[in-house]
């Protein structure tokens, strides 16, 4: 996984984890795959992006059908291409168990 995830409150068995997700320089088409284990959980229900660490022109959302964090251009909704997103850092709440 090229994505960097730092969890703040993840303990096995918790239903909610707070985490900081840092994207990297090689965003893959379709989004960055994530797993429950990335956040210290045993299963993954959904991820809610609650904020960014800087002003960006990107919109980040979780696609539960593919278990990926998807980045799109805020103004158009078009998914990001193969761009450097290494300055994109988002705070997320991860729901699972």
Image (cartoon, rainbow, N blue to C red):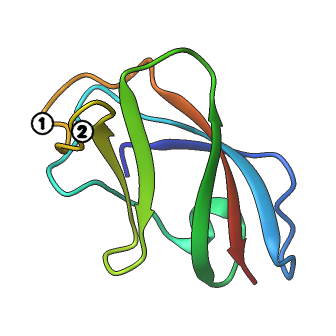
Q: Counting other residues with Cα less than 10 Å from the Cα at mark 2, is it few (<14), some (14-19), or many (20 or more)?
A: many
Q: Are marks 1 and 2 in contact (CB under 8 Å)?
A: yes
Cα separation, mark 1 vs mark 2, equals 7 Å
Q: Which residue is mark 2?
A: 27
Q: Residue furthest front?
A: 75
Q: For the C terminus, which image quadrant?
A: bottom right
Q: What is the quadrant of residue 84 in the picture?
A: top left
Look at discs 1 and 2 and give the one toward the viewer. 1
Q: Is residue 14 above or below residue 43?
A: above
Residue 88, above or below 37: above
Q: Residue at x 12, y 36 (%)?
A: 81
Q: Please tell me how crowded label 1 is: few (under 14), some (14-19), or many (20+) other residues with Cα within 10 Å.
A: some
Apparent side of residue 57 relative to residue 38 in the rendered image (left or right):
left
- Residues 84 and 49: in front is 49
Q: Earlier in the sequence, mark 1 or mark 2?
A: 2
Please, what secondary structure does the residue beneath circle 2 have?
A: loop
> Considering depth in this image, is 62 or 29 the residue closer to the camera?
62
Q: Which mark is residue 62?
A: none
- Residue 78: x, y in percent? 17, 43
Q: Residue at x 27, y 54 (%)?
A: 31
Q: Which residue is mark 1?
A: 81
Q: Quadrant of residue 39?
A: bottom right
Question: Where is residue 66 drawn, in percent x and y?
Answer: 31, 75
Residue 94 rendering spot, x and y as whole percentages: 68, 64
Q: Position of residue 51 (x, y in %)?
A: 65, 36
- At x 72% / y 66%, what residue is drawn? 40
Q: Is residue 29 left or right of residue 34?
A: left
Tell me if residue 82 comes above or below residue 92 in the rendering.
Answer: above
Q: Nearer the viewer, residue 17 or 41?
A: 17
């Amino acid at each position: 996984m090229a994505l960097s995830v730092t969890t703040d409150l993840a303990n096995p068995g918790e239903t909610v984890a707070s985490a900081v997700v840092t994207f990297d320089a090689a965003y893959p088409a379709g989004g960055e795959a994530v797993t429950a284990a990335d956040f210290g959980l045993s299963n993954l229900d959904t991820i809610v992006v609650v904020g960014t660490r800087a002003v960006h022109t990107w919109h980040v959302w979780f696609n539960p059908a593919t278990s990926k964090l998807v980045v799109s251009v805020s103004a158009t909704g078009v998914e990001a291409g193969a761009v450097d997103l290494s300055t994109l850092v988002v705070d997320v709440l991860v729901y699972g168990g």
